[in-house]
């Protein structure tokens, strides 16, 4: 049977001041009247029964996740509240072991909760292809065909466009690459065997556990010690605090890639959001209570207060009830640096 693990513990700091510690990106309504996490659940429930959908999140979001699960008709016991943030490897490993204990033939889809996906029919088709490859014993990732040189994404190189995994639509992965500088990103975009890493992973539960046992034996022993939610705290702090990419995907010889075939964005910055929203004839995008005269290529976003702009160019302006962000579009990835500055200045009410 198929299962999903939806990762919903991130803080979304690059979407400050709209995204906050208590209201991160996955709980925001950015494209519709549904929060991003609800959209993700609705999408994957086309393929997976809701009783088989699990949510990994931070315990500070217990109330929001509880409300989400009730609304989406997912068992509350399917929520996994991490004792402390340990990146993505630990929650994926713990939930995969839980799923495997209940179903030895389980195939698991790991999905972020806060990504934008258009063409949902094509998305589901890609997931089905990935499930088929996973059943052959591969750990599969969904690769996005680069639309432009991008320094904010990691890349995945497949061995050759002609080397598919036997009997599937997947390519064997050669290596994962860190977020590149612009010159290298341009090079990757020109080549046909490089893809953006979308952070989606599909595998048989047994396959992932075998790789954890082989590559991370100490962490595998920790998994065996966890018998219930009550006894997880002691083991949890000993897990490797890293991503599934570093822990497994960059080291395994069993990784394969399915090209996405659908429009995707990780919404990693205000600029990424602006690229997806329709603008006027001079490129201005306005959301909320905004008035502009004479600006071009700006994103203006206001929660409630009137936001007025005059003669601006290539800027992002975001207004909330207690903070305003004014940012050059080409520096939108650095909004998280402002958040770090707020932390250092102990301005916790603004985080």
Image (cartoon, rainbow, N blue to C red):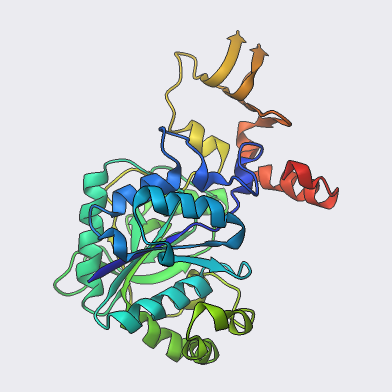
From the top left corner, tell me how far across and down residue 121 is, in percent: 21, 46
Residue at x 26%, y 45% (from the top left corner): 120
Q: Would you place residue 58 above or below residue 35 in this image?
A: below
Closer-to-camera residue (254/347): 347
- Left or right of 232: which side holds 252? left
Residue at x 53%, y 86% (from the top left corner): 219
Q: Would you place residue 305 above or below residue 158 in this image?
A: above
What is the quadrant of the N terminus in the image? Answer: bottom left
Closer-to-camera residue (180/252): 252
The answer to which quarter of the image holds residue 277 is: top left
- Left or right of 287: which side holds 130? left
Closer-to-camera residue (239/274): 239
- Left or right of 181: which side holds 341? right
From the top left corner, tell me how far across and down residue 93 is, in percent: 46, 77
Q: Would you place residue 11 above or below residue 311 in this image?
A: below
- Left or right of 346: which side holds 311? left
Q: Is residue 21 visible?
A: yes
What is the quadrant of the C terminus in the image? Answer: top right
């Amino acid at each position: 049977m198929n299962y999903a693990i939806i990762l919903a513990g991130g803080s979304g700091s690059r979407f400050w001041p709209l995204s906050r510690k208590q209201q991160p990106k996955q709980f925001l309504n950015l494209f519709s009247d549904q929060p991003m996490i609800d959209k993700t659940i609705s999408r994957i429930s086309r393929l997976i029964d809701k009783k088989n959908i699990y949510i990994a999140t931070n315990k500070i979001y217990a109330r929001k996740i509880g409300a989400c699960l009730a609304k989406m008709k997912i068992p509350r016991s399917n929520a996994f509240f991490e004792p402390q943030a340990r990146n993505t490897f630990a929650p994926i490993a713990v939930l995969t072991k839980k799923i495997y204990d209940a179903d030895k033939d389980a195939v698991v889809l790991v999905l972020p909760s806060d990504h934008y996906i258009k063409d949902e029919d094509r998305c589901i088709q890609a997931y089905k292809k990935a499930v088929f490859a996973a059943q052959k014993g591969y750990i599969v990732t969904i690769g996005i065909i680069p639309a432009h040189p991008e320094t904010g994404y990691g890349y995945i190189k497949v061995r050759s466009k002609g080397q598919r995994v036997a009997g599937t639509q997947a390519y064997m992965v050669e290596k994962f690459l860190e977020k590149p500088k612009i010159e290298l990103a341009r090079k990757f975009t020109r080549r046909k065997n490089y893809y953006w890493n979308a952070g989606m992973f599909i595998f048989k539960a047994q396959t992932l556990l075998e790789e954890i046992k082989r590559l991370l034996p100490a962490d595998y022993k920790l998994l065996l010690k966890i018998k219930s939610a009550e006894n997880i705290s002691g083991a949890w702090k000993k897990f490797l605090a890293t991503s599934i990419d570093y822990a497994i995907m960059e080291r395994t010889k069993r990784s394969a890639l399915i090209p996405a075939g659908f429009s995707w964005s990780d919404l990693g910055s205000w600029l990424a959001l602006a690229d997806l929203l329709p603008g006027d004839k001079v490129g201005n995008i306005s959301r909320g209570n905004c008035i502009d005269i004479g600006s071009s290529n700006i994103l203006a976003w206001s929660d409630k207060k009137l936001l007025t702009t005059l003669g601006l160019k290539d800027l992002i302006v975001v207004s909330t009830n207690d903070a305003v962000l004014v940012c050059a579009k080409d520096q939108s990835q650095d909004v998280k640096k402002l958040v770090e500055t707020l932390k250092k200045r102990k301005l916790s009410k603004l985080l």
